[in-house]
Image: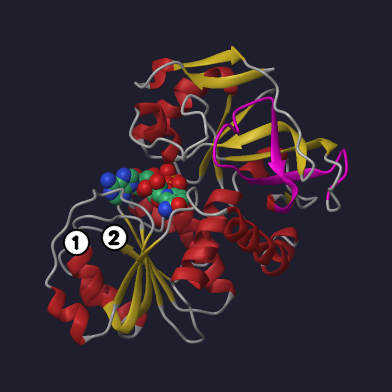
Amino acid sequence: MKALICSRSGGPEVLQIAEVAPPQLGADEVKVRVRAVGLNRADLLQRSGFYPPPAGWDPHRLGLEYAGDVEEVGAHCVLRRPGDRIMGLVVGGACSEFITVPERETLPVPERLTHVQAAAIPEAFLTAFRALWGEGELASGDAVLIRVATASVGIAAIQLARLADHVVAGTGRDAARLDLLRDLGLDHPLIEGVPDMARRAQDALGGHAQVIIDLWGGGRLAENLSLLGEEGRLVVVGLLGGSRDTIDLAGLLMRRQSIRTLTMRSQPIERRVALVRRFERQILPVLAEGQLQMPVSRVYLMSNAAQAHHDMARGGHFGKLVLTWAE
Ligand SMILES: NC(=O)c1ccc[n+]([C@@H]2O[C@H](COP(=O)([O-])OP(=O)(O)OC[C@H]3O[C@@H](n4cnc5c(N)ncnc54)[C@H](OP(=O)(O)O)[C@@H]3O)[C@@H](O)[C@H]2O)c1
């Protein structure tokens, strides 16, 4: 079968389609014919040699989320049948014609979604879901600030928090892209980099945020903590702006705030399964009704993956870039 591989660490030019051995099906696994794969910044980092997969996973094989059709099921499987359309996260190697995945980590694709639309869902929505109600411990009445709301995880987090009736403010660098978020439920768009951003954020939130979902990272830590209320939770999910920062711990201590982090890729299987099953119960029905969406910015053939990597690095997209095996 064919798979997208990076022959060595480097730029998009190291990507190539290669013949690889097909995966072996385990008793608790389903074999998936992959139709579409959502591209993630982690793929770009792995290709560059900066984000190796956990032990046991091939660093040359890329792809973290997929949508496809069940081809075959293992002897112990009870949830899925051949022909079912499914989607989900994997630790690596989604950019393959076939993959095998633990059955309990799969989600059914709602009827209204195409494979391409479905491949844009798992990483952004599962990450946002976990950040808000897992590490963020979002509780009734909490105001939420999403820093880089225009990123895919931000787009998902806005919709999920609004669905649960939270006041949501979200930032972005580009006014036009920020404006598009109004249609997805963002009441308070805030432009990054303007001098009175903090005051505007407080006006929008009616005080402090209780939860901040932070995709920016380095350079905004002190400001984020100043926008966070007592016992508030800052959840660091991404490092788009960099990984280094300095803060005075006194404020953190006096206001009993916490800084939490999450990584979707490196977590034990039982935690991954618990998240997926909770998502299936609480969020999938809403997705199936069409109340949640993830814009797909552009679709690329797998053979053109280098262009997709190049475009993601350049930025300027709104929503997901998706790779497919066939037009
Ligand atoms: N911890 C985890 O498990 C996990 C899971 C998923 C994602 N992430 C991380 O979360 C971040 C967002 O991922 P995503 O998939 O949502 O990204 P995305 O859809 O590719 O969106 C990123 C957007 O952020 C803005 N941006 C780019 N560089 C920036 C910078 N230096 N400073 C501020 N904004 C910048 C750009 O929008 P504008 O051009 O409009 O500003 C860009 O389009 C990434 O760092 C990703 O690796 C982490």
User: How far from the left and from the top, in percent, is residue 18?
Assistant: 58, 13
83 left or right of 246 in image: right
User: How far from the left and from the top, in percent, is residue 221?
Assistant: 22, 64
Secondary structure at numbered mark 2: strand
Q: Determine which residue is flagged by label 1.
A: 194
Give the residues in magenta: 80-104
- Residue at 75 percent across and 45 percent down: it is 86
Q: Nearer the viewer, residue 42 or 267?
A: 267
Q: Is residue 151 visible?
A: no
306 left or right of 118 in image: left
To which quarter of the image does residue 32 belong? top right
User: How far from the left and from the top, in percent, is residue 58?
Assistant: 51, 28
Q: Nearer the viewer, residue 275 or 164?
A: 275
Q: Nearer the viewer, residue 48 or 190?
A: 48
Quadrant where the C terminus sits is: top right
- Residue at 88 percent across and 39 percent down: it is 82
The residue positioned farthest toward the top in the image shown? 19
Tell me the kind of residue under disc 2.
Answer: Ile
Tell me the kind of residue under disc 1.
Answer: Val
Give yes or no for contact between labels 2 and 1 (Cβ–Cβ under 8 Å). Answer: yes
Distance in Å between CA atoms under marks 2 and 1:
7 Å
Residue 14 lies, with reference to residue 193, above or below; the image says above
Q: Is residue 22 visible?
A: yes
Q: Determine which residue is flagged by label 2.
A: 191
Secondary structure at numbered mark 1: loop
Residue 132 lies, with reference to residue 251, above or below; the image says above
How is the protein colored in the picture? secondary structure
Q: Please tell me the numbered disc located at residue 106.
A: none
